[in-house]
Image (cartoon, coloured by chain):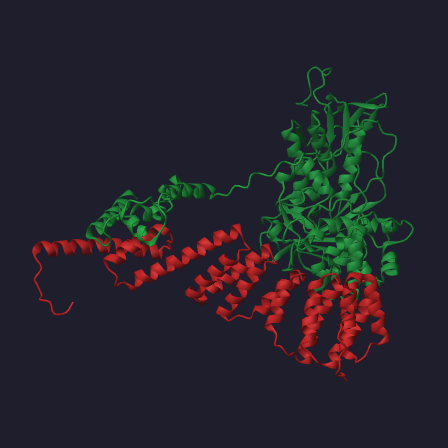
Chain colours: A green, B red
Amino acid sequence: MEFADDDSSSRRFDAVVVGTGLVESMLAAALARAGERVLHVDAHDYYGNDMAGFATLEQVRRWAEDDPPLFAEDHRDENAVLLRHEEVRVVHSQTGSLPIGRRLNVDLDARLVLASGEAVDALVALGVAHYLEFAAVGSLWFEDQKVPCSKKDVFTSADLSPAEKRKLMRVMRRALDAFEDDAGTLNERELTGSRALRRPQNKRLDETLVDDARRFVDVLRDDFGLAVAAARVVCAAAFVDPASPATEGWHGLHTHLRALGAHAGTQTALLAPIYGTAEFPQALCRACAVRGGVYALRRAPSALAVEDGKVVAAIFPDGARIPVAKAVVAADYLLTASGERAYRRVAIVESSDVEPAAIVYEGNVRCVVLGESANAVDTPTLRLVHLSSDSLEAIRDVAAKRDDATLWSLEVSFPVHPPPRDLPSNLAVCRRLPWTPRFDLTPEVDHAKALFERLRPGESLVPPPEETPDSPRDDRRDDDDDDLADLATRVATLQEAPITPSNLRQRDDDAAPDLTMPTPTDDNQQEQGEEQRPNDIIPPEGAPGDIADLQDAAAAVAASGDRQ
Amino acid sequence: MHGRKKVKASAQEVESSRRKARNYRTVNEHVLKLRAAGDTSPATLEVLKKVLLANSDSYTLWNYRRELEANEELELTAACLRKNPKSYPTWFHREWAVRRMGAEVARKELSLCAELLNVDERNFHCWNYRRVMSELVGEDAADFAREKLESNFSNYSAFHELAASLPQKLDADRARQELDLVAQAIFTDPDDQSAWWYAECILSRTDDGAVLRAQADALRDLRELEPKAKWPAIALLRVLARLSDRWTPEMIELHALLIDMDPAHARMYGAVPINNNNYN
């Protein structure tokens, strides 16, 4: 190993991070931010693990066909955690008439973020906010019904009767008020809320909504009088399974509504990364590298040496032994498979559907439709349709129901990991979490937060923002203050005589101070020539219309002509 | 210049006149190029002044001057409005300038208003100005108002625009159509007063008993969902008063409820006028 130290007693790395998936990359960036020296490796030749992205179908084909490397298990010894690579199964792939060299951004996963909230806070805290750009997701759907997210959506909805509108608004108000702790943020309340929302009685934490015994749909139906169909739409807006407990539903709806209106002119609270979901792990790795993290692809340790219940070194297949004080490992590298799997289907289809769009389908299927505005494809008539679920059948049902004009598709199955047991205390295992109805990164962010606290007890992946004392307001100073002051001085020189019609006439004859503004001169403009000309040819004061006047003007025109 | 003897110009005078013409052509050509390039700088105005004093017979130059002056007004008012978007005199001055420039400019002003109302959808100065512009252009301002209401109906100016575009007497169909818009709004947010104001306006322009009764039914539905909301109760009381020549039990109940909810306005609720004509 080229990064192995000659003298292994002096440690060059504080932490080894194995795998470049989202959670591992968040931890790598956070550890580097905390001043640790991070060695970040991945057995693959691309970043992102199951959040990788590929620019051509040829790259996807290579990814799908080349078996991920398995490691020689020649380090069997009692004091080591063995690493290998878990199989990712390509269930089915269809190649159609699409030219293989198209410029695409085919991601293995399509994820979105809420415009404000936990995930955005984490991305900002980890220093990757300025690496990422987003496109506003135009609409959120439940099956073929638009999910009304705001007062505006409810007002304009053609699917809802007036009474349903009232009931839905009551649910949304309730969710907004439910966990309200900070009324000062720019959110839906600020934008469209009426004064009624700011009544003091709406401010308190609403204990009545904490209900783990009842399902969210039941509460919506029984307590708020929503029809089942409408309740199902609310569940989609809350990004929860209809069967989830009410508390979870209220919380999901609350975080969604709070994120609305964070950016002016957006229709939903969701944002899609415009260079693909793979940008998330890649940006995090970049942030780690900027803080001194060392990167190696196509490299992974085959075992972690353990002493006294702690990881002490990473052992590479070539025998290199790199001492470390802690380790982060993607669960894919550990021999802890569960039977559960997560399924994804990505397809390139001919369509002119609105994009980016997020769709929730009955039967636990999440769908993200991406197009040109997220740089997923290079043609206005193509869409990338991502489906994900905990069931392959459900995905296939939805694909059949959508009946897209599919040019290319890929179905992949990933292992899901149960929480590991009996691990060394300085080892964090990043699991692939079970499928959830959430489009955004919150589950992964929560997972990374918990692991970070395990590795650095008492510290937080997303530290609370530092209290900055309110800076005094800048002196309100307009651009024209100087001009005004200048004018005032000139007027002051005129004050000696009272202003009367007669001495105004006199003043014309005298060389009275010039009250007209000096023409601003801008050095940059001089080089532009054409625009600058008029200033150049203002003739000097004199008898107007005189031949001399015209002469001067003509000379000035000629001169500016020469200069070009 | 009649009755003067024609004197042959001396060679010197001819030469001087030629030079003047040459100079004039040079400058004129330059100014025309500036106009073609869309130059609007104040310095050009100064140049134009000199050229026109030399030869005032050019329609083109006078037209250019008009454009420049009008443009100067537009630029100045735009800069002022950026600093102070609610300045009455500035808006009036801009209106004066545009009126002199005609429909062509007014059309551009409409898109400018749309931008400004995107930033602040409730700037009534801008709404008032826009109404003048749409008159100059001959456009129906109601369409724009409806569009703005769709994005946020908590907007008195937009409702006013809509009301202003409607005739003083509405036929039953039109009234129903507008009351449907009202229903979408008041069911979405019964605490938002702007839609209630519009409802009052629409109801005041119809005498159709069926329309009033349908409105009363809609309000009863809303009251069922929001028994504690003030505006549905007020509106229902007012509609019922128009439908009845005496205080009905339902009205008395609403009256008592309103006084209970909002004692400060007790006398106002007592003054609900009872209708003398019976709508059938």
Taking the spot 64% from the left edge, 66% from the top edge, the residue there is B159
* Residue A66 seen from this side: no
Residue A540 point in image, percent of width and height: 26, 46
* Displayed quadrant of residue A108: top right
Side of A487 where A285 appears, left or right = right
Q: Quadrant of residue B255?
A: bottom right
Total marks in image: 0
Question: Would you say residue A481 is visible in this rendering?
Answer: yes
Q: Position of residue A217 (x, y in %)?
A: 85, 57
Q: Which residue is situated farthest in the right direction here?
A: A213
Question: Which corner quadrant holds the C terminus of chain A?
Answer: top left
Residue B238: quarter of image: bottom right
Picture layout, residue A190 above or below residue B219: above
Residue B182 in the figure: left or right of residue B63: right
- Image position of A338 with respect to A213: above or below: above
For the N terminus of chain A, give its image quadrant.
top right
Depth order, front residue of A118/B216: B216
Return the x and y of residue A482 as percentages of the image width and height: 45, 41
- Residue A23: horizontal and vertical position, in percent? 74, 37
Above or below, B20 against A86 in this view is: below
Residue at position x 72%, y 81% from top?
A: B208
Q: Which is more toward the observer, A329 or A90?
A: A329
